[in-house]
Amino acid sequence: MGLSVKTSVKIVYFFILFTLKSMTCTKWDDGEIVNISLNNSIPTLYNSEVFSLTTTLSALSTVTVSIADISLLLGFLIVQVHSFKKDFILSFSRNLSIANYVNGTNLGLMLEATNPKALYIINNSPNETLDLYFSIHAYYKNAPVPGGCNMEFNVVDAPFMRIEQNNFFITVDIGPARIFVDGDCDASSMNVTHNFYKMYLNEWDHSVDGYFEGLKKMITVESILEHGTHVPHISTYSPMRRLFSLYPGIGSFYAVIAKNNKMSSAYVPIHTYSYENNYVTWTDISVMIAATIIGLIMNFIGYKLFSFQFATVGLLFAIMLIYTLINFITESLISIAIFYITGFILLYACLKFSTCIYSPLPAMFALGFQLACIIYYSIPDGVLQHSEMFWTVFTGIILITTLLPFFHHGYNIAYPIIGSFCLSIMLDSIIGSYLRYIIINTLRRISVDDFNVAIIDPPYQWRDLTITIFWLLMTLVGIFLHVKNSSKRYVYSDSLQTPLLVTTRNSPPVVYGAIHD
């Protein structure tokens, strides 16, 4: 009895599904030769990917990849191989030399379509099996070759990117592109533009699935334009380099599109988690404790302890100063001790001499500093790259806020905003958002060389939105409490509420009138 048409269609469907799945999820072992046929596939204008494969590579293994059936219309191929976190080697030969291989996690090499060489993927790790994404990108002859005018990297054509980082920056470098049919780097430098793009992964998502999903969104010109955020060129810096402010723990992909007047091509995207260690340091603990104490006092009971609330502004500035030194110089218990000693010395000084200072002034000054930090955090990159412009805007915001006409009652607004932000820093450190970089980025801009050309563009996802809502609610509660109780204060400092004439129990009565014998 023959099969029905419906049953036959189901069998064919499941066969095709099984075949496609086996092509996209395989395992490579040592000594394996992988033959790939492109079946004369050609790319579209913005989608150059003609073959892709998700696979694993066993420990201490070398795999040979051979590519065939390449269309005669093509000029060159970019073979990309991406590993999840672990380094590997991509080479033109089994015998490694300085000019025939690259190593890292996001690699690629250029092959001429008319003479495709075999490639070797090498995993030298004795224990680690690599999760890999293998991808082939095809380009026509008039397309720019990413990294074709490379003068920095070992291989002649370097379509990959280099990434470096320290405590403050992520630095991304590329080699200039050239037109494939031309080959003249001088002419190409005039006709090819390079546009950088960036994309954040979900905050604190370090999963292999999240990594490869993000990779696929930044691997072709089409997907880069759809998902990436364009990174402007800072005019005073090399067009082949971008500096990014570092945000620890969040994954980010960086991509570059080389474009002439006819075609576009994509560099091999590169990725970093920055410093993904999610441990709490002594600095973090100290800042959280101090911020929590200051936030609770200034936001909820400051109207009862007005001199103490005023004094906490001095402690707050001490925290900014000492935290900067701790963060930029060392991480030790001695620095933590200096942090607390300095802070409480300033706290005592403010309490001791608060009656001599007009109290709304420092409160509004602190608010102005915070507003200036928020504006620098939010303003488009490149606007304040010149120090003259930065300091003019920064100090101008502080002075205008400090000297506002209504500053006589400004402490009812200033103290709750500052106090609620301190509480937000505490919660920010707990849930792992990045709103604290409102202050940190400003401190970096002031004290770190070359940070003026760094791209700020902070991540803003659900955790950051949660902290923003919390900050707003705490601010409203604090303003309500301060305004409600402000009528009970006769002067700006509670230390001045003592009557000028004090009558004690043993003092003689005061008699007004003529003096008689």
Image (spheres, helix red, strand yellow):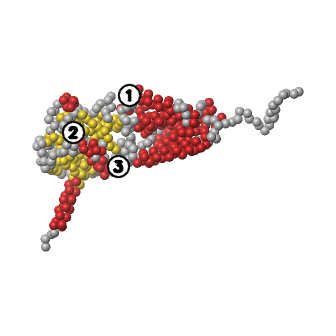
Instruction: Give the amino acid type for the residue marked by disc 2 in the picture.
Output: Ser
Q: Which residue is mark 2?
A: 264
Mark 2–mark 3 distance (CA, rounded to whole Å): 31 Å
Name the amino acid type tagged 1: His
- Residue 368 drawn at (x, y percent): 49, 34
Q: Amino acid at mark 3?
A: His
The disc, 2 or 3, on the residue closer to the chain's N-terminal end is: 3
Placement of the N terminus among the 4 image quadrants: bottom left
User: Outermost residue toward the right?
Assistant: 517
SS at mark 3?
loop
Residue 411 visible from this viewpoint: yes
Looking at the rendered structure, the secondary structure element under dot 1 is loop
Marks 2/1 in contact by CB < 8 Å: the verdict is no
Q: Earlier in the sequence, mark 2 or mark 1?
A: 2
Q: Which residue was labeled with disc 1?
A: 386
Q: Give the residue pinned by disc 3.
A: 206
